[in-house]
Amino acid sequence: MYDFIIVGGGITGSALAYELAKKNSKVLLLEKDAISDNATRYSYGGLAYWSGITPINRQLCREGIEIHRNLSDELGSDTEFRELDLILYIPRETNPETVLKNYNKFEIEPKFLSVQEACEIEPLLNPDAISGVLKLPHGHINTEKTNQAYLNAFCRLGGKIQYEQVTQFIEKEQTIIGIETLENKYYAYKVIICAGGLTRSLLKQIGINIKIYFSNAQVIVTKPTDIKLKTLVMPAILKRLEIENKVTQAENENRWINPNTDILDGICEAGAIQFIDNHLCLGQISQFITDPYQKVDLIKSEEEIRQEIGQILPALKDIPGRLHQCLVAFSNNTQPLVGKIEEWTGLYTFSGFTSTLVFAPPLARHFGNWLIEGNDSIITQLEPIQSYK
C-alpha cells in the first residue's frame, strides 16, 4: 500500500513525486512511456519568471526562478539552467505602443527596442518583418534533463517508477483506492493525476469531467547546428492565448465532454530557442482538437512552421529537423487545477498550468506541504476543483 500514486511522469509528476518522497512518503509514479514523448520533452524550456500578474502568481514566479537557480545542486544533476534575453517581436504592421500597454500588468515590465536595437541583440531577426521588439529577462533549462534529474533524485529517496499504461481507477463507494494498469493493480491512500492533456480522458473513465483542456502542439526539433541564435524569440502577440479563451467558453464545453476529431481552431506562430548543445526548437502550431489521440498531418504542419520561421528568422528556415506533436494542458482561468476533486475521496489533480516550468517546482513544494500537513498558504487560496457530469 502506497501513501501516494502519481499518474504521469512529466515535469509536474516528477517534481511532485520528488517533493513527497523528501517528506518520507511511500510514492509510486506511473508513466506510460519509458522514453518520454510529452509536452515536457518538446518544450522550449523557457522560464517566464517576469509574467506574474496576481499576487499568487508573482510569488510563485519569484519562488520558481529561485528554485531553478539552485536545482542542479539540489538534484545532483545539471539542468542546464541559464538566464538569457527573451525577445518578443512585434509584427511590422502593428503599433508597438499598443502592444507595450498589454505588458504593463506583469511584475517585470519589458523594455522596448527599435528594429536596429533588436537586430543588434539578435542578428538573425528579419528587420523587414518587425516594427520593434520587447526585451525581458528570462530563464531557460533543458526540460528533458531537468525532468530526468527529478526522477533520479526521486528514486534515490526510495521512490518507485513503473512504466505502465493506466487502464482504470479502482474505486469503492466514491473513494479512489488504487490504479489498475495493463499489468498490475496498485493501491494507495491518495491518487494524484499529473497527466497533462490526458487528464480529462483518464478522469472520464469514472464519469468525472473537470475544466481542464489541451491543445495539440507541434514543433520542429533540429539537430545541432553551427548557426547561433543568441536569444529566445517569440511573438509579442500570442494569439494562442486568445484562442484558448475562445475554445473554453460555455458553448464549446459539450465538445470537450463528447470529443471528436474536428479542429475547433488553430494557430501557427514563429518562435525559436537554441539549447546548449546547439539544437533548436522551431515554431509552434497549436490545434484545438478535443480527441487527445488524434494525429495530425506532420508534413503539412512542418511546411507551415517553416514558412512562418522564414519570415521572422530566415536563416533558420531550412535547418534539418523533425516535427513532433504533444498535448499541452491548460485551464480556463489561467490558474492551475491543484487539489482534491470535490465529491471524491482520495483523488487529486496537479495539472492545467500556465508557465508550467516556472510554476510546477514551487507549487509541487506547496502541494506536498498541503498533502502531508493539511495546510499551505498558497494551496488554500486556489479554487476548489469542481467535477460535473
Image (cartoon, rainbow, N blue to C red):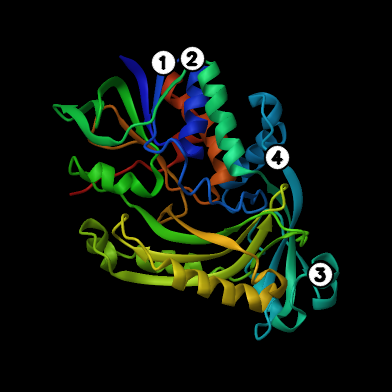
Q: Provide the residue designation for mark 4.
A: 80
Would you say 2 lies left or right of 148 here? left
Mark 2 / mark 4, whichever is N-terminal:
4
The residue that appears at 38% across and 41% down in the rendered structure is: 195
Mark 1 burial class by Cα count in 10 Å: few <14, some 14-19, many 20+: some
Identify residue type, mark 2. Gly
Identify residue type, mark 3. Pro
- Considering the numbered disc 4 on the image, is that residue within a helix, a strand or a loop? loop
Location of residue 43 with respect to 195 vertically, above or below: below
Identify residue type, mark 4. Glu
Gap between marks 3 and 2, in whole Å? 48 Å
**Image coordinates for residue 75, horizontal then vertical, percent:** 64, 25
Front one among 127 and 97? 127
Mark 2 burial class by Cα count in 10 Å: few <14, some 14-19, many 20+: some
Gap between marks 3 and 4, in whole Å? 24 Å
Can residue 98 be seen in the rendering of this structure? no
Gap between marks 2 and 1, in whole Å? 8 Å
Mark 3 burial class by Cα count in 10 Å: few <14, some 14-19, many 20+: some
Location of residue 276 with respect to 257 vertically, above or below: above
Q: Provide the residue designation for mark 1.
A: 26
Can residue 317 be seen in the rendering of this structure? yes
Determine contact: label 3, label 2, CB under 8 Å. Answer: no
Q: Provide the residue designation for mark 2.
A: 158
User: In this view, which residue lies farthest toward the left?
Assistant: 173
The residue that appears at 18% across and 40% down in the rendered structure is: 206
Gap between marks 3 and 1, in whole Å? 51 Å
Would you say 5 lies left or right of 251 here? right
Image quadrant in which the N terminus is located: top left
Mark 4 burial class by Cα count in 10 Å: few <14, some 14-19, many 20+: some
Q: Provide the residue designation for mark 3.
A: 123
The residue that appears at 53% across and 16% down in the rendered structure is: 157
